């Protein structure tokens, strides 16, 4: 957790950490002076804290009480702490109510209210937000919904958002809750530890569900600005097992350009379904020879298998770009045979 000078730490968060540092007895005396609503707010923040680093607690305690300090940091589970503390400062029913409220808030699914919002309406509503805020929102949506919203945003904004989504790792739960609540209120006017979101996998999934124009445009931008990121996204977008979703004529075109030795190694870890698809699209004689080669082949290093698979995928991506190979469902879910 960042130090108290970090702007991401709100006043209530600081107060919650200070109360944990002070212990149950002193905290009880302070909380007795607060209103029920204030206690609810502080309790929720405290229940989300696992521990506070010593340097953080020192800064906070100095900020509140000048020279107050403790050794070793605050190794206290905030959730357990508040469940023991509340019954000593509130009546039984009130304490149970606050604890139930805490449990309810902690189980809330971020941006659940956006599931039924029209993608075009949502994109128009959020396009004026900071790109980082939009990236947080899209990372919480189902991948298909996120791709639809992305397609309605201006192209340059698409590039910036997809780059930010790829670099997202951990976002403070309070920030997510704040964005969620503000967005819910604005939309209604018209009709623990940080949560891990985003990353290259999310970008790949969003682009997998995007139309070809949007996907190609964003990948071209990534090629020009961050070629390593572009390659990582491509690898996740189209993996070897995805050849199962390629139409038969595309598989036949692919097999014409793949060396038999490479295919033999690549199929070493393939599923039986994928092997069957490959054999089906070879001549009877070629399929028999491939099966014989595979049965005679000795152990292979996993790295060798992956290299062979990636080499075949390079060819597959080229053929897809040329329109000779089509991933079933890539353009609106229609399959080609």
Image (tube, rainbow, N blue to C red):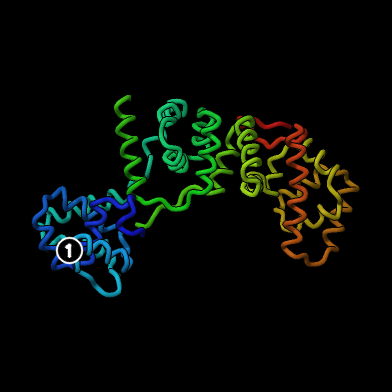
Corner quadrant of residue 243: top right
Q: Residue at point 82% right, 66% down?
A: 298
110 relative to 85 in the view: left or right: right
Q: Can you see residue 25? A: yes
Is residue 277 found left or right of 49 in the rendered image? Answer: right
Residue tagged 1: 65
User: Front-most of 231 and 261?
Assistant: 231
Residue 141 seen in this snapshot: no
Of all residues, the one furthest to the bottom in this rendering is 71
Q: In which quarter of the image is residue 22?
A: bottom left
Q: Position of residue 123 (x, y in %)?
A: 45, 29
Residue 244's spot in the image, x, y percent? 70, 44
State the residue at coordinates (34%, 30%): 187
Give how far across and how far down residue 321 sits, in percent: 73, 35
Please indicate whether residue 308 sits to the left or right of residue 224 in the image.
Answer: right
Q: Where residue 232 sits: x, y (%)? A: 63, 49
Front residue (pair 202, 271): 202
- Residue at 36% in and 36% down: 113
* Quadrant the C terminus occupies: top right
At x 47%, y 43%, the residue is: 139
Is 4 located above or below residue 54 in the figure?
above
The crowding category of the residue bearing disc 1, from other C-alpha atoms within 10 Å (few below 14, some 14 to 19, many at least 20), is: few
């Amino acid at each position: 957790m960042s130090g108290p000078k970090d702007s991401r730490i709100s006043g209530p968060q600081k107060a919650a950490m200070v109360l944990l540092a002070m212990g149950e007895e002193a905290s009880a005396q302070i909380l007795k002076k607060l209103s029920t609503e204030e206690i609810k707010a502080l309790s929720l923040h405290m229940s989300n804290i696992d521990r506070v680093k010593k340097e953080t607690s020192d800064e906070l305690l100095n900020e509140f009480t000048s020279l107050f300090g403790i050794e070793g940091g605050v190794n206290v589970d905030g959730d357990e702490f508040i469940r023991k503390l509340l019954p000593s400062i509130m009546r039984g029913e009130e304490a149970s109510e606050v604890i139930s409220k805490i449990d309810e808030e902690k189980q809330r699914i971020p941006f659940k209210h956006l599931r039924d919002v029209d993608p075009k309406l949502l994109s128009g509503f959020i396009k004026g937000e900071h790109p980082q805020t939009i990236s947080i929102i899209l990372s919480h949506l189902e991948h298909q919904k996120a791709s639809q919203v992305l397609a309605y945003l201006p192209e340059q904004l698409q590039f910036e958002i997809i780059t930010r989504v790829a670099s997202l790792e951990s976002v403070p739960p309070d920030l997510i809750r704040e964005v969620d609540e503000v967005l819910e209120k604005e939309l209604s006017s018209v009709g623990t530890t940080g949560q891990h979101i985003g990353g290259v996998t999310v970008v790949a999934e969003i682009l997998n569900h995007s139309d070809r124009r949007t996907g190609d445009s964003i990948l071209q931008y990534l090629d020009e600005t961050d070629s390593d990121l572009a390659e990582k996204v491509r690898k996740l977008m189209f993996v070897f097992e995805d050849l199962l979703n390629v139409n038969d004529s595309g598989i036949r075109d692919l097999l014409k350009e793949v060396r038999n030795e490479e295919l033999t190694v690549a199929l070493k870890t393939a599923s039986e379904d994928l092997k069957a698809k490959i054999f089906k699209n070879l001549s009877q004689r070629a399929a028999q020879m491939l099966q014989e080669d595979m049965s005679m082949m000795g152990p292979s290093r996993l790295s060798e298998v992956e290299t062979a698979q990636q080499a075949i995928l390079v060819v597959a991506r080229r053929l897809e770009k040329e329109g000779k190979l089509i991933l079933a469902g890539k353009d609106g879910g229609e399959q080609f045979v």
